[in-house]
Amino acid sequence: MAEPGALPLSARLASLRPLLGKKATFARGVGELREVVLQAYESAEPSEQAEMFALVQRVKTLLVSRYTSPPAWRAGCGLFLSAISFMEEAAQQESLQEWVLLAEKEINAGDLKELRREAAERHAAQRPAAAPVAPASLAMPQAAGSGGAPAGAFEQLQALGDPAGSDLTPEEITARLGAFLQEAGLGGADGGAEAMAGLDLRAMMESMMEAEPVGAPPASRDARDALLLKTIDAPGQSCAICCEDFELKEKVKQLPCKHLYHEACVLPWLERHNSCPVCRFALESEKQTWDAEASNVQSRSGASTGLYS
């Protein structure tokens, strides 16, 4: 129930759109939307929940098209991480996880770790979790002299996600995972030790940290410069990135696939991806341009290139 004098939820949501639409108030709008999700999502009507997700989606759209600075992405990432805890439909979860991955490429690891910690704390404060009960099949006898403290692998596994257990070494994590597999009957004749044999968790973790991001390459500068400029001559057309209607006589960019976008929307996108946001039509990437030039040089004789004249 809303507090006396507080705006109805629908009015609060409507007030956020103008804030998100301006660079000067974008971060404030994202922060307020995050608070609304944390405080009101679970008690909201389905239509209001859908509006909240639409606003979160709007934030992502603006981040990839207009507000591309690291501080803006940091605010957006905090919102996405909080929303994941409440928006539980499969399609929403998939989208939110994808948007968090986008944000990870734009902010540093320290900020990301802090945002995850903060989101977990806020989630715990808003939705206190009941103490988990280990299934009987995973229970272990109490360790002698432990003073009654449980020594089950289930509890050990849960400790891996507990902030208090964040100082575990990779070797300790490997051992605990092995114990869990043994209790779960997944470890073979030799229990978890066999399942975990040869697993160098430290090397795996270091490899994951050092791995280069995988994804579509940026469009080449030539491809971006070659985009046609088109004048809007009929109403009812809109930019697929920001979802705003074009104005009559407005100049917009046209991709080779004929899809139209605001210049301010599509150029930042193409600096990160070489594909159309709608149909995935691929433009020439920087690597393709470089490879083509290198192949051209290699195919010419030394004399024709002037290198040996």
Image: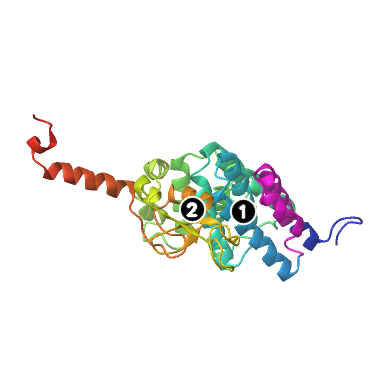
Tell me if residue 142 is in the magenta stretch. no
In the rendered structure, the answer to whether residue 83 lies left or right of residue 160 reads right
Report which quarter residue 129 is drawn in: bottom right
In the rendered structure, the answer to whether residue 31 lies left or right of residue 237 reads right
**In the depicted view, which residue is nearer to us: 121 or 159?**
121
> Residue 270 placed where, x, y %?
43, 51
- State how many labels appear: 2
In the rendered structure, the answer to whether residue 29 lies left or right of residue 279 reads right
In this rendering, does residue 140 appear at all? no
Residue that mark 2 sits on:
266
Q: Residue at x 59, y 48 (%)?
A: 77
> Which of the numbered marks, if any, corresponds to residue 59?
1
In this rendering, does residue 2 appear at all? yes
Rate crowding at label 2 as few (under 14), some (14 to 19) or many (20 or more) other CA atoms within 10 Å. Answer: many
The Cα–Cα distance between marks 1 and 2, rounded to whole angstroms, is 16 Å
> Which of the numbered marks, if any, corresponds to residue 201?
none
Relative height, residue 170 to residue 230 (above, below): above
